[in-house]
Image (spheres, rainbow, N blue to C red):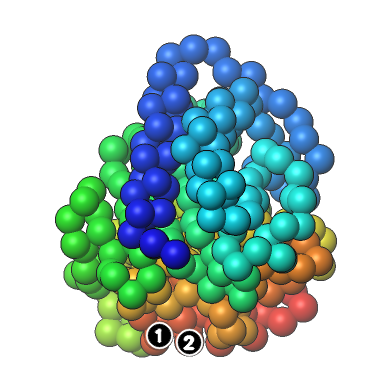
Amino acid sequence: MDFSSLTQKARQAALDAGRVIVASRDRQVDAIHKDAGSTLASQVVTEVDHEAQDAILNVLLPTCRDLDLALLTEEQKDDGKRLECDYFWCVDPLDGTLPFIQGRSGYSVSIGLVARDGSPQIGVVYDPVNEVLYEATKGHGLRRNGKPWEPGSFGSELTFTFDRSLAESAVFEEVKQALESGARSLGLDGLTTLHFGGAVMNACYALEQGPGCHFKFPKPEDGGGSLWDYAATACLFEEARAIVCDVFGEPLDLNRADSTFMNHRGALYATDESIAKMIRDIIRALGSRM
């Protein structure tokens, strides 16, 4: 398998989808309800999501035919082939549909290649607002706009990116206070909070503004993000030598057999292990109140 060539394909597909998204920003776009997950963000879709997906599939489907790759994409039904093939594309053509509709930043194109064992092999994310392309191939480091990139932790405060569901949870203020206290115990000046956008850009921004973190609680109902929300950024974080795992410290279950949702174990992104440990301790202390 030529992963370098496949990364180039993913890059081309992401940029093509980005052009579709940018071209649609000046026209009226209507949101359509879909039955997916338990949050508003998971239940809205637009024609732009489908147009961006078409642009991606135009590039990736030939690789599926030629190399026996499976495909999992947000706007198509899961056909289960990801459980049979050695690798599958994991695609979110427009992550952050809500911020896109609202005309603010926080949306992106996300394309990952995942092995059958759930390990991320390729991650490509395109932020069409800021024209930033992130890409990683397992074992070959991280690139930002085509140049090798080693993100660092240069800030004096801990950057915490979060989504609507966490902001509306009963424990949100308690989580913020615990993070601020924990940040100070790590020698930082405090906490910077940012309600940014979709899961993909939330993770990327935490990496950009290190020290940073982003996480999703586990919960009993469907939701908590989906496989396509995490596949690409998992590869980016691994190649950045940062931390990506579930809230229990185990690898993300990126090829979950019984569902495409990630609510069963949550997700945790952090720029270093000390921050990840602090977050796991906070989540453990919250227990059933999450």
* Residue depicted at 38% across the width and 71% down the height: 138
Q: Is residue 167 above or below residue 105?
A: below
SS class, disc 2: helix
Which quadrant of the rendered structure holds the N terminus? Answer: bottom left
List x then y, in percent, for residue 187. Answer: 28, 84
| Label 1 neighbour load within 10 Å: few <14, some 14-19, many 20+ | few
Residue 118 image label = none
In screen coordinates, is 151 left or right of 280? left
Q: Is residue 198 left or right of residue 205?
A: right
92 or 281, which is in the foreground?
92
Q: Residue shown at 48%/87% (left/top)? A: 277
Q: Horizontal placement of 84 versus 55: left or right?
A: right
As drawn, 76 above or below 32: below
Toward which corner of the image does residue 261 lie, by quadrant?
bottom right
Task: Verify CB contact (< 8 Å) between mark 2 and mark 1.
Answer: yes
Q: Residue at x 21, y 51 (%)?
A: 146
| 144 with respect to 224 (left or right) | left
Could you tell me if residue 265 is visible in this image?
Answer: yes
Q: Is residue 161 visible?
A: no
Residue placed most toward the observer, 263 or 55: 55
Residue at the image position 81 percent from the left and 40 percent from the top:
35
In percent of width and height, residue 183 lies at 37, 78
Could you say where residue 93 lies in the image, as x and y percent from the top left?
Answer: 54, 39
Of the numbered discs in the image, which one, if any, rests on residue 273?
1
Q: Which residue lies under the disc numbered 2?
A: 277
Pick whichever, 248 or 49, lies toward us: 49
> SS of the residue at dot 1?
helix
Residue type at numbered disc 2: Lys
Residue 127 location in percent, x, y? 37, 42
Q: Amino acid at mark 1?
A: Glu
Single out the residue that lies furthest toward the front.
Answer: 66
**Quarter of the figure with the C terminus:** bottom right
